[in-house]
Image: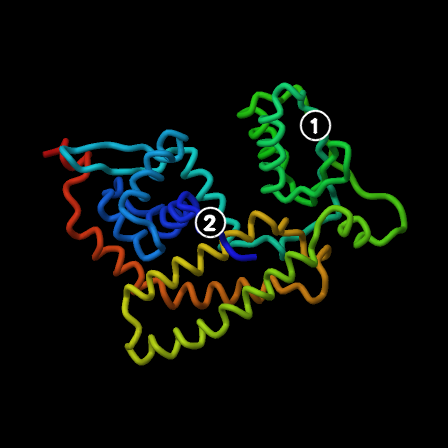
Amino acid sequence: MRPTKRPQDLVFTLFGEYLLHRDGPAWVGGLIALLQPFGLSEGAVRTVLSRMARKGWLSSERVGRHSFYSLMPRGRRLLEEGEARILHPSWSNAWDGTWFLLWYSIPEDVRHLRDRMRDRIAWLGFGSLGNGLWISPHDVEKAVRETARQLGVEGHLECFRGTRLGSAPVTDLVSKCWDLPSVNQHYGAFIDRWRPRLDSSRRDLKAGSMPARRCYTLRFELIHEFRRFPNEDPFLPRALLPDDWAGERASALFHELHDLLVGPADAWVDSVFEGSPPAPAAAEAG
């Protein structure tokens, strides 16, 4: 599982990892400088930022000839959810054997809403039992109902909660609903790719031979790849996972390397924005 290099995905990674908790809007000149190492030209950055603003992910403001961008509530909510799932995976959460079931039937003439509903419940970790019936070991009723409200499809779904009956192993059910072997393979590939980089980064940082800019780009690449896992890992409770689950080892590697790079990488981002012109709020205050 290699991450895409689509401009919008790169912008989401930048905002989610480096700008989500910074105060104030980001100067477009700084955004251009921070995205340039990943193959985006100035024109490409301006184009994708403008497009994301039209889609409602970002807001744009101008002060004189300078442009600034901020996350809209929709974009901030998406990135905060992703951050929580990356930093605090729920494999070890207690599970009492209760399943949450969701059934929906959205008319063909609003297929786009059906597609958005399917994408959202997949993000929430549901597995499909077929014929519009989805199942999850998580208590996600609030998130499901909020999604249905936002899409205006509340009247097209039903929710249930209960326990599974029968003597067949629960692993049979899990294998029908989720492709855990594929997810596990991707975690293993992540470990194989990033273990050498962890070792070399630890050595170079200790020797003082790793520039801050390199820490920034490596941390960007690390999070850009790892943030794809919440899109495919349902984060099932430990009781439903295979014994050789690689997710926890991959997460531990991610956190160790991420923590090594945080300080110098953030210092590099600070240096890029040092010469920013006054942001809109500051300009109005003056």
Q: Regarding mark 2 in the picture, which secondary structure is present there?
A: helix
Mark 1 is surrounded, within 10 Å at the Cα level, by few (under 14), some (14 to 19) or many (20 or more) other residues, namely some
Q: Write the residue at 58% across / 26% down.
A: 112
Label 2, on which residue? 83
* Quarter of the rendering containing residue 89: bottom right
Check the image and report above or below for 42 versus 112: below
Estimate the x, y position of residue 228 in percent, counting from the top left: 52, 52
Q: Position of residue 277 (x, y in %)?
A: 14, 43
Task: Give the numbered dot on residue 104.
Answer: 1
Direction right: furthest residue? 167
**Is 214 rendered above or below residue 71?**
below
In the rendered structure, which amino acid carries the disc numbered 1?
Tyr
State the image quarter where residue 44 is shown: top left
Residue sitting at 24 percent across and 48 percent down? 30
Of labels 1 and 2, the one closer to you: 1
Identify the image quadrant of residue 139: top right
Q: CA distance from mark 1 to mark 2?
A: 28 Å
Checking the image for residue 236, the label placed there is none
Image quadrant holding the C terminus, namely: top left
Q: Nearer the viewer, residue 285 or 110?
A: 110
Q: Earlier in the sequence, mark 1 or mark 2?
A: 2
Tell me: 111 left or right of 40. right
Q: Quadrant of the N terminus?
A: bottom right
158 left or right of 247 in image: right
Residue 36: x and y in percent read: 30, 53
Determine whether the residue tagged by mark 1 lies in a helix, strand or loop.
strand
Query: Could you tell me the amino acid type at mark 2?
Result: Glu
Few, some or many residues within 10 Å of mark 2 (<14, 14–19, 20+):
some
How many numbered marks have been drawn onto this rendered protein structure?
A: 2
The reply to whether callout 1 and callout 2 are in contact (CB within 8 Å) is: no
Task: Locate residue 210 relative to residue 96 in the image: left or right.
Answer: left
Across and down, in percent, residue 264 comes to 29, 65
